[in-house]
Image (cartoon, rainbow, N blue to C red):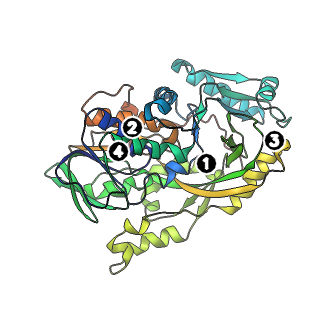
């Protein structure tokens, strides 16, 4: 871990050591740029290592599918690229239908995904049972993408960071960026708790914290976070390499035979100071998913209030107080996850919880990322808001960010990911291929 800041001016400084920031650092350095990456805590500490481990192309908007396909193609050769075992397996993804509305929604998504040439197919109950033997008899069918895969989140971001270091990237951990430095209307670097880092360009890839980093520049990014709780079970014999989603639970079996379980349709929204200004941006989306969101009022809001009070540590150094942020798991959501898994696959009813954790998933109103260098500030690139797709889209997001840093046109059209879409009111409607269901609490 580097303890001193680099001297001289870099081509780019990347703020945020998650999968997006680390992959962007790697691909930018591979292209010959001198890069510094800085994170308030440890590389990969937050959501990049706390997610489900899915590499999926089944996404909420048809215009996201080409980008997810592009990223998945990078995933296929990523272990060789980085020279590391990522526990990558291409077992497909299967979304289960428990009722007729589910099947109708899947049919609608199949039609919407048609122009992308994604290998998505609708399976009947017999085909679904063949893929997932022993599954409950109430499954009517499924939506299947055979080219989807999975990997170990705890390995991937670190592998990108190690490979980036091997290409000369300077990585500064446990060093909070307090603000961006500008001269006129362009970036000149960042101010950290240990001093300044000069750079021609700055990438904001801070996940759920990006909004607050951009706000002092007058850049309005509608972004907030929901808290997702994840379980890892005790091990079982090898069953499937596919990732699966059902109404009560999402699951994958890792390389050690343990199942990673998360809520198929339950998350927690922790009220914060941004919530009031978010009402207009997120109101329609929040109403759509109202039965699936649990609202929490407590420590997060109190922490935000302290940042407004002079004389408090949170006011003096807010990012340092979030050095190693540990969102608490929602134990009330964990039990339904495990119960739902036991109902879905009764042969694994003996499995118990071995580990439980939570992570903050950054969200935008249209649940699509912001990948843009037309930010109103020259030299500033935004790469955030991946809305639950960050792990799957990470390599593509990093490659695209590197292209923007070089002034190149990205390989995939990212017009739909521009920052200006929110101010323009040009935000697409959600494609609900996961029907909203009332959630038992």
Of labels 2 and 4, the one closer to you: 4
Pick the front one: 172 or 356: 172
Q: What element carries label 1?
A: loop
Q: Residues within 10 Å of mark 2 (few under 14, many from 20)?
A: many
- The C terminus appears in which quarter of the rendering? bottom right
Position in image of residue 136 (x %, y %):
84, 37
Mark nearer the N terminus (2 vs 4): 4
Mark nearer the N terminus (3 vs 4): 4
Position in image of residue 267 (x %, y %):
61, 54
Q: How crowded is mark 1: few (under 14 residues within 10 Å), some or many (20 or more)?
A: some
Q: In this view, does 256 lie to the left or right of 177?
A: right
Name the residue that disc number 4 marks. Answer: 165
Report, in whole angstroms, how far the alpha carbon at label 2 lies from the one at label 1: 30 Å
Q: In this view, does 239 lie to the left or right of 393?
A: right
Report, in whole angstroms, how far the alpha carbon at label 2 lies from the one at label 4: 15 Å
Name the residue that disc number 2 marks. Answer: 398
Mark nearer the N terminus (1 vs 3): 1
Q: Residue at x 51, y 51 (%)?
A: 47
Circle 3/circle 4 CB separation < 8 Å = no
Of labels 1 and 3, the one closer to you: 3
Report, in whole angstroms, how far the alpha carbon at label 2 lies from the one at label 3: 37 Å
Q: Is mark 2 on a helix, strand or loop?
A: helix
Identify the residue at the far bottom of this view.
311
Report, in whole angstroms, how far the alpha carbon at label 3 lies from the one at label 4: 43 Å
Image height check: is 191 above or below 364? below
Mark nearer the N terminus (1 vs 4): 4
Name the residue that disc number 1 marks. Answer: 289
Report, in whole angstroms, how far the alpha carbon at label 1 lies from the one at label 4: 41 Å
Of labels 1 and 4, the one closer to you: 4
Q: Which residue is drawn at 73% across and 23% down?
A: 123
Q: Which mark is residue 345?
A: 3
């Amino acid at each position: 871990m580097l303890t001193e800041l680099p001297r001289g001016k870099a081509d780019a400084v990347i703020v945020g050591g998650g999968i997006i920031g680390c992959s962007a650092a790697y691909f930018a350095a591979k292209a010959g740029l001198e890069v510094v990456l800085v994170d308030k805590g440890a590389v990969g500490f937050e959501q990049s290592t706390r997610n489900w481990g899915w590499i999926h192309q089944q996404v909420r908007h048809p215009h996201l599918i080409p980008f997810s396909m592009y990223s998945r193609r990078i995933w296929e050769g990523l272990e060789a690229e980085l020279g590391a075992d990522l526990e990558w397996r291409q077992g497909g993804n299967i979304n289960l239908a428990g009722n007729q509305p589910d099947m109708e929604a899947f049919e609608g998504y199949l039609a919407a995904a048609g122009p992308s040439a994604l290998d998505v197919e609708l399976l009947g109950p017999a085909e679904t049972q063949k893929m997932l033997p022993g599954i409950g008899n109430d499954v009517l069918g499924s939506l299947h993408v055979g080219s989807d895969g999975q990997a170990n989140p705890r390995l991937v971001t670190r592998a990108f960071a190690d490979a980036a270091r091997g290409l000369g990237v300077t990585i500064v951990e446990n060093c909070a960026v307090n603000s961006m430095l500008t001269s006129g209307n362009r970036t000149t670097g960042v101010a950290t708790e240990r001093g300044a880092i000069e750079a021609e360009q700055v990438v904001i890839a801070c996940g759920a914290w990006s909004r607050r980093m951009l706000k002092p520049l007058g850049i309005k990014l509608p972004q907030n976070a929901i808290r997702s709780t994840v379980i890892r079970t005790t091990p079982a014999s090898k069953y499937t390499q596919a990732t699966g989603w059902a109404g009560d639970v999402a699951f994958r079996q890792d390389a050690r035979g343990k199942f990673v379980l998360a809520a198929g349709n339950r998350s927690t929204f922790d009220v914060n100071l941004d919530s009031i200004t978010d009402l207009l941006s997120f109101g329609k989306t929040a109403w759509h998913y109202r039965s699936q969101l649990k609202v929490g009022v407590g420590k997060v809001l109190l922490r935000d209030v302290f940042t407004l009070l002079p004389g408090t540590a949170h006011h003096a150094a807010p990012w340092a107080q979030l050095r190693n942020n540990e969102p608490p798991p929602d134990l009330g959501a964990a039990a339904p996850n495990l119960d739902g898994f036991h109902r879905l696959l009764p042969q694994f009813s003996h499995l118990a919880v071995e580990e439980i954790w939570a992570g903050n998933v950054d969200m935008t109103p249209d649940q699509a990322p912001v990948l843009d260098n037309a930010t109103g500030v020259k030299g500033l690139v935004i790469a955030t808001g991946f809305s639950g797709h960050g792990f799957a889209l990470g390599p593509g997001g990093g490659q695209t960010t590197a292209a923007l840093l070089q002034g190149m046109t990205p390989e995939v059209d990212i017009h739909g990911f521009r920052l200006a879409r929110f101010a323009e009111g040009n935000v697409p409607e959600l494609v609900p291929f996961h029907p909203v269901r009332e959630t038992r609490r």
